[in-house]
Image: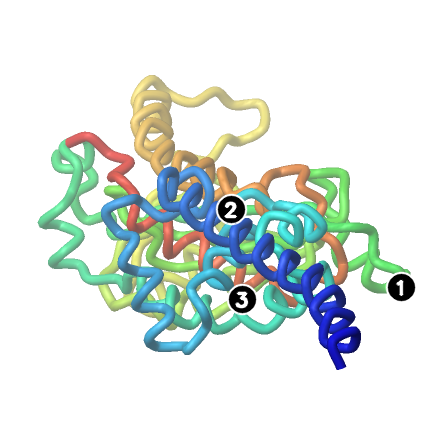
Amino acid sequence: MTKSSSDTSVLNEPDFKKEHYRKSMLEYTVERIKKRTLFYIGVPKDCYDLIKIMHEHTGIPEYQILLCLKKNRLDTKFSELSDEFGISKTYVSKIVSENIPKIAEIMRPFIVKLDKISIKRCLPIAFRKNYYNVTCILDCLEIEIQKPGKAVNQSLTWSEYKKANTIKYLVSSTPNGLVNYISQGYGGRISDVCLVETCDFLKCLPSGSHVMADRGFKHIEPLLFAIGCKLTRPPSVVSGNKLSKEEVKETKKIASLRIHIERVIRRIREFSFLKSHACVNNNLLGKLDDIIVIACGLINLQNSLINK
Protein backbone atom coordinates (compact mmCIF):
# COMPACT_ATOMS: atom_id res chain seq x y z
CA MET A 1 0.00 0.00 0.00
CA THR A 2 2.87 2.31 0.88
CA LYS A 3 4.55 1.61 -2.45
CA SER A 4 1.32 2.27 -4.34
CA SER A 5 0.83 5.60 -2.55
CA SER A 6 4.41 6.59 -3.33
CA ASP A 7 3.98 5.73 -7.03
CA THR A 8 0.82 7.87 -7.22
CA SER A 9 2.67 10.81 -5.67
CA VAL A 10 5.44 10.52 -8.24
CA LEU A 11 2.95 10.39 -11.12
CA ASN A 12 1.00 13.46 -9.93
CA GLU A 13 4.01 15.66 -9.20
CA PRO A 14 4.84 16.56 -12.86
CA ASP A 15 1.15 17.38 -13.50
CA PHE A 16 1.13 19.67 -10.49
CA LYS A 17 4.29 21.43 -11.68
CA LYS A 18 2.84 21.79 -15.18
CA GLU A 19 -0.38 23.32 -13.84
CA HIS A 20 1.56 25.63 -11.54
CA TYR A 21 3.74 26.75 -14.47
CA ARG A 22 0.65 27.38 -16.63
CA LYS A 23 -0.94 29.60 -13.97
CA SER A 24 2.32 31.49 -13.45
CA MET A 25 2.66 32.15 -17.19
CA LEU A 26 -0.97 33.29 -17.41
CA GLU A 27 -0.62 35.68 -14.46
CA TYR A 28 2.64 37.09 -15.82
CA THR A 29 1.12 37.65 -19.30
CA VAL A 30 -2.01 39.35 -17.93
CA GLU A 31 0.07 41.67 -15.71
CA ARG A 32 2.34 42.56 -18.63
CA ILE A 33 -0.67 43.45 -20.79
CA LYS A 34 -2.16 45.61 -18.02
CA LYS A 35 1.02 47.70 -17.85
CA ARG A 36 0.91 48.56 -21.59
CA THR A 37 -2.71 48.10 -22.61
CA LEU A 38 -2.62 50.46 -25.59
CA PHE A 39 0.38 48.71 -27.13
CA TYR A 40 -0.73 45.11 -26.53
CA ILE A 41 -4.52 45.27 -27.02
CA GLY A 42 -5.32 48.79 -28.32
CA VAL A 43 -7.29 49.77 -25.20
CA PRO A 44 -6.30 53.04 -23.44
CA LYS A 45 -5.24 52.41 -19.84
CA ASP A 46 -8.07 54.55 -18.44
CA CYS A 47 -10.58 52.40 -20.39
CA TYR A 48 -9.35 49.04 -19.11
CA ASP A 49 -12.67 48.50 -17.29
CA LEU A 50 -14.04 47.74 -20.77
CA ILE A 51 -12.52 44.26 -20.39
CA LYS A 52 -14.65 43.66 -17.27
CA ILE A 53 -17.75 44.93 -19.09
CA MET A 54 -17.06 42.49 -21.95
CA HIS A 55 -16.68 39.68 -19.42
CA GLU A 56 -19.99 40.55 -17.72
CA HIS A 57 -21.95 40.77 -20.98
CA THR A 58 -20.47 37.75 -22.77
CA GLY A 59 -19.29 35.43 -19.97
CA ILE A 60 -15.90 35.09 -21.71
CA PRO A 61 -13.05 34.74 -19.16
CA GLU A 62 -10.97 37.93 -19.00
CA TYR A 63 -7.75 36.20 -20.07
CA GLN A 64 -9.49 34.94 -23.24
CA ILE A 65 -10.65 38.49 -24.04
CA LEU A 66 -7.07 39.71 -23.64
CA LEU A 67 -5.84 36.88 -25.85
CA CYS A 68 -8.30 37.80 -28.64
CA LEU A 69 -7.52 41.52 -28.42
CA LYS A 70 -3.77 40.84 -28.48
CA LYS A 71 -4.22 38.69 -31.58
CA ASN A 72 -6.29 41.50 -33.09
CA ARG A 73 -3.78 44.22 -32.22
CA LEU A 74 -0.40 42.56 -32.87
CA ASP A 75 -1.38 39.55 -35.03
CA THR A 76 0.59 37.35 -32.65
CA LYS A 77 1.11 33.80 -33.90
CA PHE A 78 -1.03 31.07 -32.33
CA SER A 79 2.09 29.22 -31.17
CA GLU A 80 3.36 32.34 -29.38
CA LEU A 81 -0.02 32.95 -27.71
CA SER A 82 0.02 29.30 -26.65
CA ASP A 83 3.33 29.81 -24.85
CA GLU A 84 2.33 33.15 -23.31
CA PHE A 85 -1.02 32.01 -21.93
CA GLY A 86 0.07 28.46 -21.06
CA ILE A 87 -2.56 26.70 -23.17
CA SER A 88 -2.44 24.51 -26.25
CA LYS A 89 -2.21 25.96 -29.75
CA THR A 90 -5.46 24.21 -30.72
CA TYR A 91 -7.27 25.80 -27.77
CA VAL A 92 -5.92 29.25 -28.72
CA SER A 93 -7.36 28.82 -32.22
CA LYS A 94 -10.72 27.77 -30.76
CA ILE A 95 -10.79 30.77 -28.37
CA VAL A 96 -10.12 33.24 -31.20
CA SER A 97 -12.63 31.63 -33.57
CA GLU A 98 -15.48 31.54 -31.03
CA ASN A 99 -14.93 34.82 -29.17
CA ILE A 100 -13.97 37.39 -31.82
CA PRO A 101 -17.61 37.70 -33.09
CA LYS A 102 -18.90 38.12 -29.50
CA ILE A 103 -16.36 40.85 -28.76
CA ALA A 104 -17.24 42.58 -32.06
CA GLU A 105 -20.91 42.77 -30.98
CA ILE A 106 -19.85 44.57 -27.79
CA MET A 107 -17.63 47.00 -29.76
CA ARG A 108 -20.11 47.79 -32.56
CA PRO A 109 -22.00 50.50 -30.57
CA PHE A 110 -18.69 52.37 -30.14
CA ILE A 111 -18.80 53.16 -33.86
CA VAL A 112 -20.82 56.35 -33.47
CA LYS A 113 -23.93 57.07 -35.50
CA LEU A 114 -24.32 60.25 -37.55
CA ASP A 115 -25.71 63.08 -35.46
CA LYS A 116 -25.50 66.47 -37.20
CA ILE A 117 -25.96 68.49 -33.99
CA SER A 118 -23.19 66.67 -32.11
CA ILE A 119 -20.89 66.82 -35.14
CA LYS A 120 -21.35 70.59 -35.50
CA ARG A 121 -20.74 71.09 -31.79
CA CYS A 122 -17.35 69.33 -32.06
CA LEU A 123 -16.43 70.68 -35.52
CA PRO A 124 -12.68 71.45 -35.87
CA ILE A 125 -11.82 75.10 -36.56
CA ALA A 126 -10.52 74.33 -40.07
CA PHE A 127 -14.04 73.29 -41.15
CA ARG A 128 -16.00 76.14 -39.59
CA LYS A 129 -15.65 78.83 -42.24
CA ASN A 130 -16.38 77.18 -45.60
CA TYR A 131 -17.20 73.56 -44.79
CA TYR A 132 -19.33 73.80 -41.64
CA ASN A 133 -22.04 71.57 -43.19
CA VAL A 134 -19.73 68.56 -43.67
CA THR A 135 -20.93 65.67 -41.52
CA CYS A 136 -18.59 62.90 -42.66
CA ILE A 137 -15.49 62.18 -44.74
CA LEU A 138 -15.40 59.11 -46.96
CA ASP A 139 -12.64 56.80 -48.19
CA CYS A 140 -11.88 53.14 -48.88
CA LEU A 141 -9.54 50.78 -47.07
CA GLU A 142 -8.03 47.66 -48.64
CA ILE A 143 -6.52 44.74 -46.73
CA GLU A 144 -4.34 42.18 -48.49
CA ILE A 145 -5.34 38.51 -48.17
CA GLN A 146 -3.82 35.20 -49.19
CA LYS A 147 -4.49 34.18 -52.76
CA PRO A 148 -7.81 32.25 -52.77
CA GLY A 149 -7.83 28.69 -54.09
CA LYS A 150 -10.73 29.15 -56.53
CA ALA A 151 -10.17 31.09 -59.75
CA VAL A 152 -13.49 32.97 -59.35
CA ASN A 153 -12.52 34.23 -55.89
CA GLN A 154 -9.08 35.19 -57.17
CA SER A 155 -10.74 37.34 -59.82
CA LEU A 156 -13.26 38.93 -57.43
CA THR A 157 -10.60 39.87 -54.88
CA TRP A 158 -7.91 41.09 -57.29
CA SER A 159 -7.18 44.80 -56.83
CA GLU A 160 -5.50 46.65 -59.70
CA TYR A 161 -4.67 49.47 -57.28
CA LYS A 162 -2.84 47.22 -54.78
CA LYS A 163 -1.71 44.63 -57.34
CA ALA A 164 -2.78 41.91 -54.89
CA ASN A 165 -5.84 40.01 -53.67
CA THR A 166 -7.63 42.26 -51.19
CA ILE A 167 -10.81 42.84 -49.23
CA LYS A 168 -12.14 46.40 -49.54
CA TYR A 169 -14.04 48.39 -46.90
CA LEU A 170 -15.83 51.74 -47.02
CA VAL A 171 -14.80 53.90 -44.05
CA SER A 172 -16.50 57.09 -42.92
CA SER A 173 -15.36 59.41 -40.14
CA THR A 174 -16.72 62.59 -38.61
CA PRO A 175 -14.67 65.77 -39.24
CA ASN A 176 -13.09 65.42 -35.78
CA GLY A 177 -11.81 61.90 -36.53
CA LEU A 178 -14.35 59.46 -35.05
CA VAL A 179 -15.27 56.42 -37.14
CA ASN A 180 -19.03 56.59 -37.74
CA TYR A 181 -19.37 53.87 -40.37
CA ILE A 182 -17.52 50.78 -41.56
CA SER A 183 -18.99 48.59 -44.28
CA GLN A 184 -18.85 44.85 -44.70
CA GLY A 185 -15.88 43.56 -46.68
CA TYR A 186 -16.11 43.26 -50.47
CA GLY A 187 -13.75 41.77 -53.03
CA GLY A 188 -10.96 44.18 -54.01
CA ARG A 189 -12.20 44.20 -57.62
CA ILE A 190 -15.23 46.34 -56.69
CA SER A 191 -15.02 50.05 -57.54
CA ASP A 192 -15.39 52.73 -54.86
CA VAL A 193 -18.65 53.96 -56.37
CA CYS A 194 -20.13 50.46 -56.64
CA LEU A 195 -19.15 49.82 -53.04
CA VAL A 196 -21.06 52.90 -51.86
CA GLU A 197 -24.05 51.80 -53.92
CA THR A 198 -23.98 48.20 -52.65
CA CYS A 199 -23.41 48.67 -48.92
CA ASP A 200 -25.93 50.30 -46.57
CA PHE A 201 -24.01 53.58 -46.09
CA LEU A 202 -26.62 55.67 -47.92
CA LYS A 203 -29.36 54.29 -45.66
CA CYS A 204 -27.44 55.55 -42.61
CA LEU A 205 -27.21 59.15 -43.93
CA PRO A 206 -29.77 61.60 -42.55
CA SER A 207 -31.30 63.93 -45.12
CA GLY A 208 -29.30 67.14 -45.52
CA SER A 209 -25.93 65.54 -44.81
CA HIS A 210 -22.83 66.82 -46.59
CA VAL A 211 -20.30 64.12 -47.50
CA MET A 212 -16.66 65.00 -48.25
CA ALA A 213 -14.70 62.69 -50.55
CA ASP A 214 -12.02 62.75 -53.25
CA ARG A 215 -12.55 62.92 -57.01
CA GLY A 216 -12.88 59.12 -57.26
CA PHE A 217 -16.34 59.35 -55.66
CA LYS A 218 -17.76 61.95 -58.08
CA HIS A 219 -20.24 59.45 -59.56
CA ILE A 220 -22.02 59.01 -56.21
CA GLU A 221 -23.33 62.60 -56.44
CA PRO A 222 -26.67 61.54 -58.04
CA LEU A 223 -27.11 58.87 -55.36
CA LEU A 224 -26.62 61.44 -52.61
CA PHE A 225 -28.85 63.98 -54.34
CA ALA A 226 -31.66 61.40 -54.50
CA ILE A 227 -31.74 61.16 -50.69
CA GLY A 228 -31.37 64.91 -50.08
CA CYS A 229 -27.63 64.92 -49.39
CA LYS A 230 -24.70 66.73 -51.00
CA LEU A 231 -21.17 65.76 -52.06
CA THR A 232 -18.22 68.04 -51.31
CA ARG A 233 -15.22 67.12 -53.47
CA PRO A 234 -12.35 68.74 -55.38
CA PRO A 235 -13.24 70.20 -58.81
CA SER A 236 -13.05 67.76 -61.71
CA VAL A 237 -9.99 67.78 -63.95
CA VAL A 238 -10.85 67.87 -67.67
CA SER A 239 -8.27 66.38 -70.02
CA GLY A 240 -6.31 69.12 -71.79
CA ASN A 241 -7.62 71.91 -69.53
CA LYS A 242 -5.93 73.43 -66.50
CA LEU A 243 -7.73 74.23 -63.27
CA SER A 244 -8.34 77.90 -62.55
CA LYS A 245 -6.62 79.54 -59.56
CA GLU A 246 -9.83 79.38 -57.56
CA GLU A 247 -10.24 75.66 -58.35
CA VAL A 248 -6.63 74.98 -57.35
CA LYS A 249 -7.19 76.76 -54.03
CA GLU A 250 -10.40 74.81 -53.41
CA THR A 251 -8.62 71.52 -54.23
CA LYS A 252 -5.90 72.32 -51.70
CA LYS A 253 -8.42 73.29 -49.02
CA ILE A 254 -10.41 70.08 -49.43
CA ALA A 255 -7.22 67.98 -49.52
CA SER A 256 -6.05 69.56 -46.26
CA LEU A 257 -9.35 68.57 -44.62
CA ARG A 258 -9.58 65.10 -46.18
CA ILE A 259 -6.27 64.30 -44.48
CA HIS A 260 -8.33 63.54 -41.36
CA ILE A 261 -9.78 60.36 -42.90
CA GLU A 262 -6.24 59.35 -43.92
CA ARG A 263 -5.16 59.72 -40.31
CA VAL A 264 -8.12 57.58 -39.19
CA ILE A 265 -7.13 54.86 -41.66
CA ARG A 266 -3.51 55.09 -40.50
CA ARG A 267 -4.68 54.51 -36.93
CA ILE A 268 -6.76 51.50 -38.06
CA ARG A 269 -3.63 50.09 -39.70
CA GLU A 270 -1.80 50.27 -36.37
CA PHE A 271 -3.62 46.99 -35.74
CA SER A 272 -1.20 44.52 -37.30
CA PHE A 273 -4.01 42.37 -38.67
CA LEU A 274 -5.07 45.32 -40.85
CA LYS A 275 -1.73 46.58 -42.14
CA SER A 276 -1.38 47.17 -45.88
CA HIS A 277 0.65 44.00 -46.45
CA ALA A 278 -0.50 41.89 -43.50
CA CYS A 279 -1.80 39.20 -45.90
CA VAL A 280 -4.64 37.75 -43.83
CA ASN A 281 -4.75 33.96 -43.68
CA ASN A 282 -7.71 32.40 -45.52
CA ASN A 283 -8.70 30.52 -42.36
CA LEU A 284 -9.36 33.87 -40.61
CA LEU A 285 -11.03 35.56 -43.57
CA GLY A 286 -14.50 34.93 -42.16
CA LYS A 287 -13.57 36.89 -39.03
CA LEU A 288 -12.15 39.93 -40.87
CA ASP A 289 -15.39 41.96 -40.67
CA ASP A 290 -15.48 41.42 -36.90
CA ILE A 291 -11.78 42.21 -36.54
CA ILE A 292 -12.13 45.59 -38.27
CA VAL A 293 -15.24 46.45 -36.20
CA ILE A 294 -13.24 45.80 -33.02
CA ALA A 295 -10.37 47.96 -34.30
CA CYS A 296 -12.68 50.86 -35.24
CA GLY A 297 -14.47 50.69 -31.89
CA LEU A 298 -11.17 50.75 -30.00
CA ILE A 299 -9.67 53.69 -31.91
CA ASN A 300 -12.79 55.70 -31.07
CA LEU A 301 -11.81 55.24 -27.41
CA GLN A 302 -8.27 56.49 -27.97
CA ASN A 303 -7.05 60.08 -27.78
CA SER A 304 -8.58 62.52 -30.27
CA LEU A 305 -6.88 62.72 -33.66
CA ILE A 306 -7.72 66.40 -34.10
CA ASN A 307 -6.35 69.32 -32.11
CA LYS A 308 -8.91 72.12 -32.39
Can residue 64 be seen by looking at this rendering?
yes
Frontmost residue, 213 versus 204? 204
Q: Amino acid at mark 1?
A: Lys
| Residue at image coords 13%, 37% | 128
Residue 100's label in the rendered image is: 3
- The answer to whether residue 157 is above or below residue 34 is below
| Number of marks present in the image shown | 3
Q: Which residue is mark 2?
A: 73
Q: Secondary structure at mark 3?
A: helix
Callout 1: few (<14), some (14-19), or many (20+) C-alpha neighbours within 10 Å?
Answer: few
Circle 1 or circle 2, nearest the eye: 2
Q: Secondary structure at mark 2?
A: helix
N-terminal of the two: label 1 or label 2? 2
Frontmost residue, 140 versus 219? 140
Circle 1 or circle 3, nearest the eye: 3
Q: Which colour style is shown?
A: rainbow
* Residue 221, horizontal then vertical, whole percent: 42, 55
* Residue 292, horizontal then vertical, whole percent: 51, 56
- Seen in the image, is 204 located left or right of residue 265? left
- Whether residues under marks 3 and 2 lie with C-beta atoms below 8 angstroms apart, the answer is no
Residue 64's label in the rendered image is: none
Q: Which residue is mark 1?
A: 150
Q: CA distance from mark 1 to mark 2?
A: 29 Å
* Residue 163, horizontal then vertical, whole percent: 76, 38
* Residue 275, horizontal then vertical, whole percent: 59, 40
Q: Amino acid at mark 3?
A: Ile
